[in-house]
Amino acid sequence: MQDKFLKQAFLLSFLLFANYFFSQTKKLNLIIVNDREISKSVYDFKITPTNGSLKESITGKYIPGDLILDSKDFDKLLSIDTKDFEVSFTTISTVNKDLVKDFKYVVTIPKVYFNSEYLIVNIFNMYNKISQKKYSKLIKNNKEYYVVIETPNSMKFD
């Protein structure tokens, strides 16, 4: 009986370690800052080329400080003939002390930014009075938010 348990435990351990060693991922240093706070609840993260041969989205997993992509997807991302990508994601944010809400964002990020040491996406929502005062005149396309993207070498204002 104990011999059977040891075999099962060994097989399970082998499968877990094999999955860990054979799954290759690429981590990008990415921080999403939403109204001056690091977003901790980000889901449904998708990267889509604005134009090019790839029509399907690449799905990633965001953990504060890291964007995790499969190595195949990251290589595909860099090989696509496009200058910009549309990055879409949903965050859970506190609007006020009585309201927590999901917000869907779509941000255009240049392809060269994905090779940077780090990438910071600053989102300023217009429901926030401070952000509204500073950025409301800069918003295009009637969005409810303004985006500033920072890398070590440059900044992009949306």
Image (spheres, helix red, strand yellow):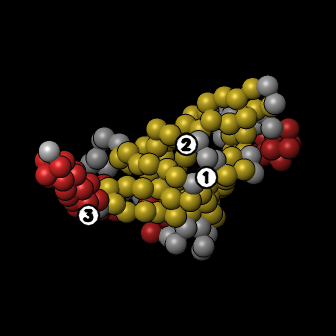
Tell me where residue 27 appears, x and y as whole percent: 43, 62
Q: Which residue is mark 3?
A: 21
Label 2 element class = strand
As displayed, is residue 52 above or below residue 118?
A: above
How dense is the environment of label 1, judged by Cα within 10 Å: few (below 14), some, or many (20 and up)? Answer: many
**Number of the label disc, if any, that sits on residue 3:** none
Tell me where residue 85 appears, x and y as whole percent: 44, 51
Question: Is residue 106 at all visible to an observer of this figure?
Answer: no
Tell me where residue 96 appears, x and y as whole percent: 80, 31
Q: Earlier in the sequence, mark 2 or mark 3?
A: 3
Label 1 element class = strand
Choose top left, top right, bottom left or bottom right for residue 30.
bottom right
* Nearer to us: label 2 or label 3: 3
Q: Earlier in the sequence, mark 1 or mark 3?
A: 3
The quarter of the image holding the N terminus is top left
Q: Amino acid at mark 2?
A: Val
Q: Is 140 on the left or on the right of 98, as rendered? A: left
How dense is the environment of label 3, judged by Cα within 10 Å: few (below 14), some, or many (20 and up)? Answer: few
Q: Are marks 2 and 1 in contact (CB under 8 Å)?
A: yes
Residue at image position (46%, 63%) is 28
How far apart are labels 2 and 3 at the CA level? 26 Å
Q: Is 132 on the left or on the right of 119, as rendered? A: right
Label 3 element class = helix
Q: Which residue is mark 2?
A: 42
